[in-house]
């Protein structure tokens, strides 16, 4: 393997017989072709050069390149796409690392450091770089930002895979780094903690709701049809603490399933760490919960250190694979919560006291954080309508500014950014979300007091953006019902997030680089009546449409003595206390949320767009919400159609002609461009969407 660019820092050793060694070294490209006679000499030289290359402050100790592909053409500056593994070392006694749970129990090297590594995907511009790193936090090991923003492949092989290559045309260095120990794809390789060499054991919990009857289920978090996290294998199948229960609703009573009726199964291709077998079969629409004993906890919080130290490496170390002046992290859903927790835990300052991330774009994380830095952490767990219930995800505090917990008024106030502010390492921060997160991710708690009575102020370095009518991820066009695990009663909302992402990235770069303030925050408020309790929601009575009465709540949870300090979840399932009040966006006469940032489809509507959808009856529990999805509820085409069904919403015929619709739609685009929610270069694509949507809605 070789780079066709002039990588000033790649040392490559090719050994006859197929063995290859590679490391990054601060100097010209060296090629050493070794025969079997000189193998030992080459390896010694390689190790010596790598050791000499690493400055004392560098927490990235080396990087191994597995493959490199040149991508160029069509007027785009050439990029090297690199697949690699990055190696780290951290000092357990350093104050910047002391928050990592069980780091003091991990094995150490001769220098007293804990070593770990992570998979890396890197798109490195060979010239024309704009000085900014866009670091994607992979969602359960998977990349998605290139596909979402540029409309191409998440793992491009050539120029044809790049979509419109917007990110590359802007000159961004693009990376994705493994941070999750139990994820496939981009992976974190972290050590196991022990108690002075003796195994550590504890309780773990797994819950799931099947959409079809089955007799076997894998240990792990199944999300959108795949394993989000493999979790731990059972330590002792006969331990009496292993308990399986079933219930019908999240807050319903648990029924214990007799131990004689179920058993653990061996690892297989579909159950990596084994599973459970229920002789009578798991029933669709019911919530099953397994509590069982595991051992050998992985030091999962090293994922925070990996992100921190990789960004600092590219910014400050001349031996790094490439150089950037500014580092922005982007995280979606689970990874938006990861970045919120990254700040809450105080990880944005490296061991040398330098700012690692200059900007953070945390999207659709809602008010959540996650099970990222605990003993026996399960990072994939989130909090869905019928699974991952009562995990340490939506836990106090929720707001960026200090707030008080109404259940513990004597406790000092706390906020998401307390440590970052105290350490003077607060990055510029975008917290963005869609209509779904108000129903499924407790999003109102981001901007209200914890008692739900008042709006909270927002820090000047923070923007909160609500993208009205979108669902957790963009639905298909033309609109379709959810399928499989996400089978739904209504069509999904197809509104795209792509155009907002491009503007947010541009606005973040201008804010950090040039000091140009981005658009002001936009979200519903208590004070103006756009954020209300569920019983005040004025949703119209649309025939055949049944809005849910429930939503995901945040609770006071108790996992055992001092669990917030020790990060050991000793009680499973936890004791559940009072919920925090959740509010929802008030809707207009059509049933679409009033507040927020409106795409033209919301300003000039042809349908109602909601942040909720209901489960298809074939999957059980049809009155419950389906994860991640909103609803697209078309208007009647004509007055006669509307009257025939009793739909209270005006028909398309009563609202516009085609010419009037397109004129107003195009004006809405111009307004978004002027307000910097959309880039001028994207106007033509949005206008094409408008004509397409009119034809779909009226034909």
Image (cartoon, rainbow, N blue to C red):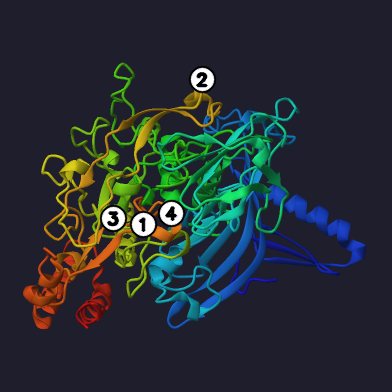
Looking at marks 3 and 1 on the same chain, the residue that comes earlier in the sequence is marked by 1
Question: Please, what secondary structure does the residue beneath circle 1 have?
Answer: loop
For the residues bearing labels 4 and 2, Cβ distance under 8 angstroms: no
Q: Residues within 10 Å of mark 3 (few under 14, many from 20)?
A: many
Q: Distance between the residues labelled 3 and 1?
A: 8 Å
| Label annotation for residue 260 | none
**Residue under label 2:** 561
In terms of sequence position, does the residue under pointer 3 or pointer 4 come before the other? 3
Name above or below for residue 247 compared with residue 210: above
Q: Do the residues labelled 4 and 1 touch (CB within 8 Å)?
A: no
The residue at which mark 1 appears reads as 472
Which of the two marks, 4 or 1, is nearer to us in this view?
Answer: 4
Residue located beneath label 4 in the image: 620
Give percent across and percent down for residue 609. 24, 62
Q: Which residue is drawn at 13% across and 72% down?
A: 644
Task: Give the labeled residue for mark 3.
Answer: 611
| Residue under the point 50% across and 39% down | 371
Helix, strand or loop for disc 3: loop
Would you say the residues marked 3 and 1 are in contact, meaning their CB atoms lie under 8 Å apart? no
Q: In this view, does 81 lie to the left or right of 443?
A: right
Classify the position of the N terminus by image quarter. Answer: bottom right
Give the mark nearer the N terminus: 1 vs 2: 1
- For residue 662, above or below residue 621: below
SS under mark 4: loop
Whichever of callouts 2 and 3 sits on the residue coming sooner in the sequence is 2
Tell which of 447 and 1 is nearer to you.
447
Quick one: SS at disc 2? loop
């Amino acid at each position: 393997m070789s780079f066709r660019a002039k990588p000033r820092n790649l040392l490559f050793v090719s050994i006859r017989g197929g063995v290859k060694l590679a490391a990054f070294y601060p100097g010209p490209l060296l090629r050493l072709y070794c025969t079997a006679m000189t193998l030992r000499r080459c390896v010694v030289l390689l190790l010596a050069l790598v050791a000499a290359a690493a400055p004392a402050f560098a927490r990235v100790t080396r990087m191994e390149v597995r493959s490199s592909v040149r991508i160029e053409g069509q007027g785009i500056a050439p990029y090297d796409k690199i697949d690699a593994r990055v190696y780290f070392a951290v000092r357990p006694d350093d104050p910047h690392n002391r928050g990592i749970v069980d780091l003091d129990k991990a094995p150490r090297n001769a220098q007293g450091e804990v070593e770990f590594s992570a998979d890396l995907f890197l798109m490195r511009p060979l010239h024309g770089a704009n000085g900014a790193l866009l670091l994607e936090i992979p969602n359960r090991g998977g990349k998605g930002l290139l596909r979402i923003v540029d409309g191409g492949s998440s793992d491009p092989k050539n120029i044809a895979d790049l979509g419109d290559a917007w990110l590359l045309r802007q000159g961004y260095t693009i990376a994705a780094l493994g941070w999750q120990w139990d994820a496939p794809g981009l992976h974190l390789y972290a050590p196991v903690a022990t108690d002075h060499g003796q195994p550590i054991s504890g309780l773990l919990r797994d819950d799931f709701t099947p959409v079809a009857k089955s007799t076997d289920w894998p240990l792990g978090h199944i999300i959108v049809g795949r394993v989000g996290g493999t979790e731990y294998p059972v330590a002792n199948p006969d331990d009496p603490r292993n308990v399986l229960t079933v219930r019908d609703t999240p807050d319903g009573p648990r029924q214990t399933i007799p131990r004689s009726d179920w058993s653990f199964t061996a690892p297989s291709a579909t159950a990596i760490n084994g599973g459970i077998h229920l002789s009578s079969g798991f029933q669709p629409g019911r919530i099953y919960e397994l509590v069982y004993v595991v051992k050998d906890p992985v030091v999962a919080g090293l994922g925070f250190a990996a992100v921190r130290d990789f960004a600092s490496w590219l910014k400050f170390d001349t031996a790094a694979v490439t150089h950037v002046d500014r580092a922005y992290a982007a995280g979606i859903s689970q990874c938006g919560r990861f970045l919120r927790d990254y700040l809450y835990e105080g990880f944005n300052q490296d061991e040398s006291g330098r700012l690692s991330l200059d900007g953070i774009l945390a999207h659709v994380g809602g008010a959540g954080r996650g099970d990222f830095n605990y003993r026996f952490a399960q990072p994939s767990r989130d909090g869905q309508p019928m699974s991952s219930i009562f995990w340490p995800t939506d836990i106090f505090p929720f707001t960026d500014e200090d707030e008080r917990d109404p259940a513990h008024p004597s406790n000092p106030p706390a906020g998401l950014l307390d440590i970052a502010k105290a350490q003077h390492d607060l990055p510029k921060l975008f917290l963005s979300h869609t209509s779904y997160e108000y129903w499924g991710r407790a999003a109102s708690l981001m901007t209200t007091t914890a008692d739900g009575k008042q709006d909270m102020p927002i820090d000047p370095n923070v923007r909160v953006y609500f993208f009205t009518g979108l669902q957790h991820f963009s639905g298909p066009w033309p609109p379709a019902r959810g399928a499989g695990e996400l089978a739904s009663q209504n069509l999904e909302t197809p509104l795209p997030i792509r155009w907002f992402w491009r503007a947010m990235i541009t606005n973040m770069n201008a804010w950090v680089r040039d000091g140009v303030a981005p658009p002001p925050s936009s979200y519903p408020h208590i004070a103006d009546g756009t954020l209300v309790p569920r019983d005040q929601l004025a949703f119209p009575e649309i025939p055949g449409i049944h809005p849910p009465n429930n939503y995901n709540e945040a609770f006071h949870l108790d996992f055992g003595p001092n669990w917030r300090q020790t990060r050991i979840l000793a009680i499973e399932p936890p004791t559940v206390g009072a919920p925090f009040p959740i509010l929802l966006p008030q809707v207009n006469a059509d049933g679409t949320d009033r507040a927020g940032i409106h795409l033209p489809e919301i300003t000039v509507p042809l349908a109602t767009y909601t942040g909720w959808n209901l489960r298809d009856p074939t999957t059980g529990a049809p009155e419950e919400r389906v994860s991640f999805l909103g609803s697209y509820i078309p208007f009647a085409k004509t007055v006669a159609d509307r009257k025939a069904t009793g739909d209270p919403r005006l028909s398309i015929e009563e609202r516009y002609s085609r010419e009037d619709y397109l004129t107003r739609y195009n004006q809405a685009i111009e307004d978004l461009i002027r307000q910097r929610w959309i880039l001028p270069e994207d106007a033509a694509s949005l206008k094409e969407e408008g004509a397409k949507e009119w034809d779909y809605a009226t034909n």
